Image: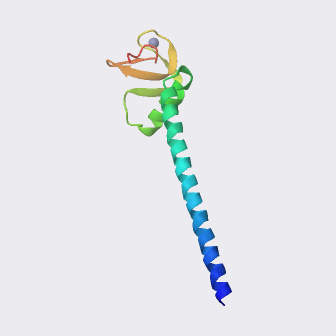
């Protein structure tokens, strides 16, 4: 019976080691995810991803009045260009290019 007891001890130890390894892996994944978020934040100001950021902001705060979406398009109050997204600037709805950032 002592042999059975020693085997159980080894099994428990192996299980504990496996759990530790999993925890370490989870920590590494979390750090990698945080790094990925940070780097993506740095690239969000790039030209190619601005529309994606705008959509994310609009969906996160639909009550915000800084911009509105016109599916059929609307003319910019400043340059007259018809765009689907208008930004509120000094009471006028302007396109993204005319919005003073
Ligand atoms: Zn404009």
Q: Where ligand 1 lies, by image quadrant?
A: top left
Of the pair 48 and 17, the residue shown nearer to us = 17
| Image location (x, y in percent) of residue 61 | 41, 37
Tell me if residue 11 comes above or below residue 79 in the rendering. below
Residue at the spot 46% in from the left edge and 18% down from the top edge: 96
| Image location (x, y in percent) of residue 80 | 47, 10
Of the pair 63 and 36, the residue shown nearer to us = 36
Task: Tell me: 53 left or right of 14.
Answer: left
Task: Tell me: 17 left or right of 53.
Answer: right
Tell me if residue 83 comes above or below residue 27 in the rendering. above
The answer to whether residue 71 of the structure is visible from this angle is: no
Residue at the spot 56% in from the left edge and 61% down from the top edge: 20
Task: Tell me: 77 left or right of 91.
Answer: right
Residue at the spot 63% in from the left edge and 75% down from the top edge: 10
Where the N terminus falls, by quadrant?
A: bottom right
| Image location (x, y in percent) of residue 5 | 63, 84
The answer to whether residue 26 of the structure is visible from this angle is: yes
| Image location (x, y in percent) of residue 97 | 46, 14
């Amino acid at each position: 019976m002592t042999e059975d007891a020693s085997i159980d001890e080894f099994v428990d130890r192996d299980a504990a080691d496996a759990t530790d390894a999993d925890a370490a892996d989870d920590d590494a994944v979390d750090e990698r995810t945080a790094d990925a978020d940070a780097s993506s934040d740095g690239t969000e100001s790039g030209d190619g991803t601005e529309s994606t950021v705008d959509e994310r902001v609009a969906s996160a705060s639909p009550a915000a009045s800084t911009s509105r979406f016109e599916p059929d398009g609307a003319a910019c109050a400043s340059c007259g260009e018809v765009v689907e997204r208008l930004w509120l600037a000094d009471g006028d709805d302007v396109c993204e290019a005319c919005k003073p950032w």
